[in-house]
Amino acid sequence: MPLWNGIFAIVLAPIFEELIFRGIFMNYFFNKENRLNNILAIVISGLLFGFAHELQFDANWLMYSALGCFLSFTYMHFRDIRYSIALHFLNNLLSII
């Protein structure tokens, strides 16, 4: 099972999470192109990402929310989900090593 857990945490989870939080959520709810809408999309997607990983307001929640905001910003900047997936891969890989 440890091998499967590693594969899931490094490869599968980032793909599914990025498709949900960036691909679906940001495009469905924040599809207008203006500055306020983009900032709200980044912040709300990041906060939801934090809540998906940690349900309490603590340092871990702040860390996950900050990562979610960074991944959301990356998605908004490049307009390509592959970049945020790659950064998510890298983050999870480094946390397991």
Image (cartoon, rainbow, N blue to C red):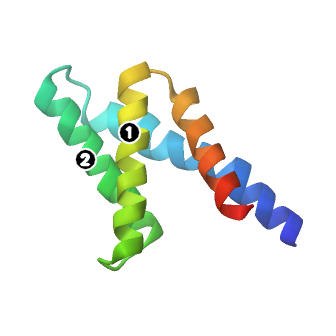
In the rendered structure, the answer to whether residue 62 lies left or right of residue 85 reads: left
Near-viewer residue (28 or 2): 2
Residue 79, image x and y in percent?
Answer: 42, 20
Give above or below for 48 relative to 25.
below
Q: Which residue is mark 1?
A: 72
Q: Is 97 in front, or is 31? A: 97
| Relative image position of residue 64 (x, y in whole percent) | 42, 61
Tell me the kind of residue under disc 2: Val
First in sequence, mark 2 or 1: give its number.
2
Checking the image for residue 43, the label placed there is 2
Drawn side of residue 31 relative to residue 68, left or right: left
Is label 2 in a helix, a strand or a loop?
helix
Residue contact at pointers 2 and 1, CB within 8 angstroms: yes
Q: Quadrant of the C terminus?
A: bottom right
* Residue that appears at 49% across and 22% down: 80
Label 1, residues with CA under 10 Å away: few <14, some 14-19, many ≥20: many
Type of the residue with mark 1: Ser
Q: Is residue 77 above or below residue 86?
A: above
The residue positioned 52% from the left and 35% from the top of the image is 84
